[in-house]
Image (tube, rainbow, N blue to C red):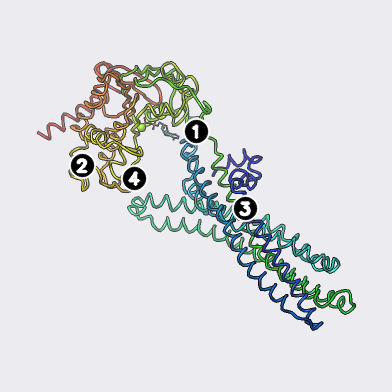
């Protein structure tokens, strides 16, 4: 899981919190500063109240009137409540904005990452980073930020007030607290490590749930429920154990801090009492000191919790920035070559070798040399695993081919600007993805699709009669990944999506495999018609079924990643080779089927 980015980016990732402050929090500085000032005011008032109590007690002993002190204490108390609430609003609100911005940036980056990234990542982990970890970051900047400012101010102000009452007593009282805070340092480091581990485990849980939900039909069909529950249990248990260890650390560190508060109180009485008796301190001053210490202790107690929020937030931030920093594989840099569009491009393959990034030693395409003429309809034939889809993926640049091995109108494919290149083409992949939405929305992926064009694309894709039998026609919602449609219907919805999109290059990867012969013949005609238009697109069709390739200008025959033959259908069936062998088998079968039918 993203192990490489972590190692590569150790330097840059070292200070995720500083980066968050700079890139996301800085723009809300006025709100934060006002909030901090308000916090300062509340703390200042809170530490001033004990002084008033001290005066009141001394006045009581001297039998002077108390009214003025009581009024001051009441007004200050109310002011503390009001100003504290305001400071919370001022500090929490930017946290929401910040979360919103962070999530938006993360999603935008996910949209730009290429398949080479997704091939090695777990989706569940990505989902977990985008949800759980972002929530932790909000807690970090909201509660965490508030507490840091609050504790710092409370400690500084009470410390200062104490020193002004009695430096010696302050030293004796604060010493145990300082020592214990030093002791819990180890715990804080451990908290960070465990928090990171816990969030990774949560990612694994999400991955398991996501995978299980998607494969529910397979799980239930193979009665593998128990096994999947078992596997889930393992992950859940790992996560639970980490959570328990986190709790253990917290429950050791926290009492240490609370204990130090108790020791401080003891020191105050043991040392302050004799000081009063000796006349170095008035009773009022000792009371004020005690009250100050009670202002000081709650933030100290919340420090344990604050530490864990901060460490969790840091770990979450690290995980989020790892995603935001994942490099987008586009060797051309920000802007590449933009070719003129409006005409089908001519494509040249020049000694193309290719291996997938996760298996660099296994060449999937070996030394391909071929020409795909501008505006031509070119077929790709080959047995399963021969590399047809791979070649098409390279043209779409879902993977990058080696430089100089694919030329588009004479320009290196990898030098082209990726967006404009993809905008020029319509791709119908072998395993198309349908969104859980209406058919119309699946055909027109734009924000405001054109209804009439959707209608004509659907007709061209031979979906017309299918739509009549569907409950809501074009508005029928197809279910998760198109589960409510048949395989052939799904393929044709994807084909309609490609035809609706149109463009200079139409790539159809085995889209006619799940339709009957009659529909296939109709679709082959549709595609052949496209080629007769004046602004003829270049069309690439891959198929196992030679009947789908009959109308192509030329067919490239692949075998085990090599180009073994090429030419029009009529020529290829004359020569001996896999094309003719396949043709003989398939035409015999078709003849037999016809006989049965008649
Ligand atoms: N993402 C991938 N990572 C690694 N290897 C892959 C990947 N996709 C395909 N391959 C391998 O590349 C080879 C060619 O696969 P490809 O999908 O291009 O074949 P194909 O000709 O389209 O087959 P089919 O007719 O079954 O669709 C296969 O051996 C396959 O195992
Ligand atoms: Mg394929």
The Cα atoms of the two marked residues, 3 and 1, are separated by 50 Å
Residue tagged 1: 359
Instruction: Judge depth for marks 1 and 4 and give the one in front.
Output: 4
Q: Position of residue 154 (x, y in %)?
A: 71, 62
Mark 2 within 8 Å of ligand 2, using the beta carbon? no
Residue that numbered label 4 is attached to: 481
Rendering coords of residue 568 (x, y %) = 27, 17
State which mark lies toward you, 4 or 3.
Answer: 3
Secondary structure at badge 1 equals helix
- Frontmost residue, 282 versus 342: 282
Q: Which residue is mark 2?
A: 467
Q: CA distance from mark 1 to mark 4?
A: 29 Å
> Between marks 2 and 1, how big is the CA–CA gap?
43 Å
Above or below 14: residue 241 = below
Q: Nearer the viewer, residue 558 or 247?
A: 247
Q: Quadrant of residue 344?
A: top left
Q: Which badge, 3 or 1, is on the more N-terminal residue?
A: 3
Q: How dense is the environment of label 4, judged by Cα within 10 Å: few (below 14), some, or many (20 and up)? A: some
Q: Residue at x 33, y 38 (%)?
A: 448
Q: Is mark 1 within 8 Å of ligand 1?
A: yes
Q: Secondary structure at mark 2?
A: helix
Give left or right: position of 534 versus 339.
Answer: left
**First in residue order: circle 4 vs circle 3:** 3
Is residue 60 toward the left or the right of residue 73 in the image? right
Of the two numbered discs 2 and 3 in the rendering, the one whose residue sits closer to the viewer: 3
Judge left or right: residue 513 versus residue 119.
left
Please, what secondary structure does the residue beneath circle 3 have? helix
Q: Is mark 4 within 8 Å of ligand 2?
A: no
Give the residue pinned by disc 3. 32
Q: Secondary structure at mark 4?
A: helix
Going from N to C along the chain, the mark reached first, 2 or 4, is: 2
């Amino acid at each position: 899981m993203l192990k490489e980015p972590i190692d590569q980016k150790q330097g840059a990732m070292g200070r995720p919190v500083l980066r968050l402050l700079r890139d996301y929090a800085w723009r809300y500085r006025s709100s934060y500063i006002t909030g901090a000032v308000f916090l300062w005011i509340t703390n200042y008032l809170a530490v001033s109240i004990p002084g008033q109590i001290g005066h009141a007690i001394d006045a009581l002993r001297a039998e002077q009137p108390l009214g003025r002190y009581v009024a001051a204490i009441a007004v200050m108390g109310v002011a503390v409540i009001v100003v504290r609430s305001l400071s919370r609003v001022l500090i929490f609100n930017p946290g929401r904005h910040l979360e919103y911005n962070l999530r938006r940036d993360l999603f935008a980056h996910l949209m730009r990452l290429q398949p080479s990234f997704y091939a090695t990542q777990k989706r569940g982990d990505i989902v977990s980073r985008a949800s759980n970890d972002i929530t932790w970051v909000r807690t970090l900047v909201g509660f965490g930020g508030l507490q840091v400012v609050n504790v710092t101010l409370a400690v500084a102000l009470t410390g200062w007030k104490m020193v002004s009452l009695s430096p010696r007593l302050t030293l004796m009282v604060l010493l145990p607290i300082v020592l214990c805070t030093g002791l819990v340092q180890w715990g804080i480091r451990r908290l960070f490590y465990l928090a990171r581990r816990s969030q990774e485990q949560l990612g694994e849980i999400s991955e398991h749930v996501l995978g299980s939900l998607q494969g529910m039909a397979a799980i239930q069909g193979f009665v593998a429920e128990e096994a999947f529950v078992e596997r889930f249990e393992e992950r859940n248990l790992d996560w639970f154990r980490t959570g328990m260890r986190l709790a253990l650390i917290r429950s050791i560190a926290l009492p240490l801090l609370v204990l130090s508060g108790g020791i401080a109180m003891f020191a105050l009485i043991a040392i302050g009492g004799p000081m009063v008796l000796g006349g170095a301190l008035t009773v009022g001053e000792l009371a004020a000191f005690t009250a100050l210490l009670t202002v000081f202790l709650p933030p100290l107690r919340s420090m344990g919790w604050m530490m864990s929020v901060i460490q969790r937030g840091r770990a979450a931030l690290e995980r989020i920035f790892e995603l935001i920093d994942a490099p987008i594989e586009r060797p051309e840099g920000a802007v590449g070559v933009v070719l003129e569009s409006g005409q089908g491009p001519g494509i040249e393959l020049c000694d193309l070798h290719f291996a997938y990034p996760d298996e660099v030693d296994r060449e999937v395409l070996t030394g391909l040399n071929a020409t795909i003429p501008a505006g031509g309809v070119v077929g790709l034939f080959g047995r399963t695993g021969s590399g047809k889809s791979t070649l098409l993926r390279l043209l779409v640049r879902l993977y990058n081919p080696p430089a100089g091995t694919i030329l588009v109108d004479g320009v290196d494919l990898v030098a082209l600007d990726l967006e404009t290149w993809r905008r020029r083409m319509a791709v119908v992949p072998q395993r198309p993805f349908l969104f859980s939405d209406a058919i119309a929305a699946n055909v027109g992926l734009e924000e405001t699709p054109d209804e009439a064009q959707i209608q004509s694309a659907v007709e061209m894709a031979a979906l017309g009669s299918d739509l009549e039998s569907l409950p809501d026609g074009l508005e029928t919602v197809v279910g998760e990944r198109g589960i409510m449609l048949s395989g052939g219907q799904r393929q044709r919805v994807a084909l309609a999506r490609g035809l609706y999109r149109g463009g200079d290059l139409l790539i159809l990867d085995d889209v006619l495999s799940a339709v009957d012969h009659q529909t296939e013949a109709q679709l082959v005609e549709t595609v052949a018609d496209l080629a007769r238009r004046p602004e003829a697109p270049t069309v690439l069709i891959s198929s196992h079924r030679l009947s789908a390739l009959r109308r192509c200008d030329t067919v490239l025959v692949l075998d085990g990643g090599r180009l073994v033959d090429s030419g029009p259908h009529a020529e290829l069936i004359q020569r001996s080779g896999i094309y003719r062998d396949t043709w003989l088998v398939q035409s015999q079968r078709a003849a037999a089927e016809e006989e049965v039918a008649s």
